[in-house]
Amino acid sequence: MKLSISNLSKTYANGVEALKNISLTIPAGMFGLLGPNGAGKSTLMRTLATLQEADSGSVFLGELDVLDEKDAVRRMLGYLPQDFGLYPKVSPYELLDHFAVLKGLSDKRRRKEVVLGLLHQTNLYDVRNKQLGGFSGGMRQRFGIAQALLGDPKLIIVDEPTAGLDPEERVRFHNLLSDIGDDKIVILSTHIVSDVADLCSQMAVINQGQLLLTGEPMQQVAAIQGKIWARFIAKSELPAYGQKHSVISTRLLAGRTRIHVYSDEHPGDGFEPVAGDLEDVYFAAIAGCDTRRPAAVLA
Ligand code: ADP
């Protein structure tokens, strides 16, 4: 099964064009939707999760018309929103059990089995009877995944799940997501490139409501080899370099300013070639570079 998005557009009442004619095919497996804050990711995720209307376009989950047959889609959907409230005084066991009842798991024994299984899967079994109010960000997100997995959904949408997690919790969360299974469509929306680099077999980059690229991360990285150049500069030189070169990123490295530029040919000016990574793919796309052109042959 795949999710086919065609010509999806959404303009908010305040005039912001959050989605501009997005067409995208999302196969089974882990799909990374990458974009900076304000790109339109949540708008797209909420639309796919049937929580918000689009202005035009269509979305099909297999044969199912997602924008039209909302109830049917909801039965196949697991959703972890960007912000969600938890009842602080209840335990993960109680709340998951409650959600399971809402999902239609009426058989008590079967429900207990499912709930305990999910608590094991998300590494929350040991704290199953503690109050959710005392949970860390990582534990909350793992609980979010547990509730999203109730009812064995075929489409799972997780919106910015790793924002605010510390590195150890992020790794834990990545491991949890990577175990969900290849037969489901899992859409991970994030502004963190390493989430996609670590987890996703397919990806898309959006910015200002527009789809900038889509494909396999590894292929995208291969396509920019020979085109990324780097050097240290004085911070004050940045505007001058920005005028002359296609600067895609500026980073601090050990307190010094290092810029990456995108160029088919050696840009001169003391630049050295570097192996491009997914971060370069992302920044080049955001900067408007056409990374789909064939790579220049290095002299
Ligand atoms: P992201 O999830 O990538 O940060 P969003 O989908 O939340 O992006 O937002 C995309 C754009 O739409 C932003 O400019 C945001 O300010 C705007 N936006 C989001 N929700 C609303 C809303 N309910 N009303 C008006 N503008 C909105």
Image (spheres, grey):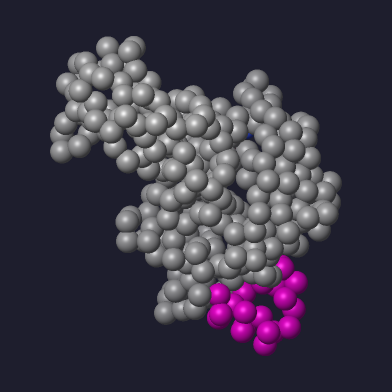
Q: Which residue is painted at 65% across and 50% down in the image?
A: 26
Q: Is residue 229 visible?
A: yes
Q: Which quadrant is home to the C terminus? A: top left
Which secondary structure type mostly characterizes the magenta part of the structure? helix
Task: Where is residue 247? Give x, y as percent.
Answer: 35, 23
Question: Quadrant location of residue 56?
Answer: top right
Residue that lies at the very extreme toward the bottom in this rendered image:
109
User: What residue is drawn where x is 74% and y is 38%?
Assistant: 6
Residue sitting nearer the eye, 54 or 115: 54
Instruction: Note whether 98 is above or below 46 in the view shown.
Output: below
Q: Quadrant of the N terminus?
A: bottom right
Whether residue 161 sits left or right of residue 16 in the image: it is left
- Write down the region rendered in magenta: 97-118
Q: Is residue 190 left or right of residue 273?
A: right
* Side (left or right) of 229 relative to 290: left
Ligand 1 quadrant in view: top right
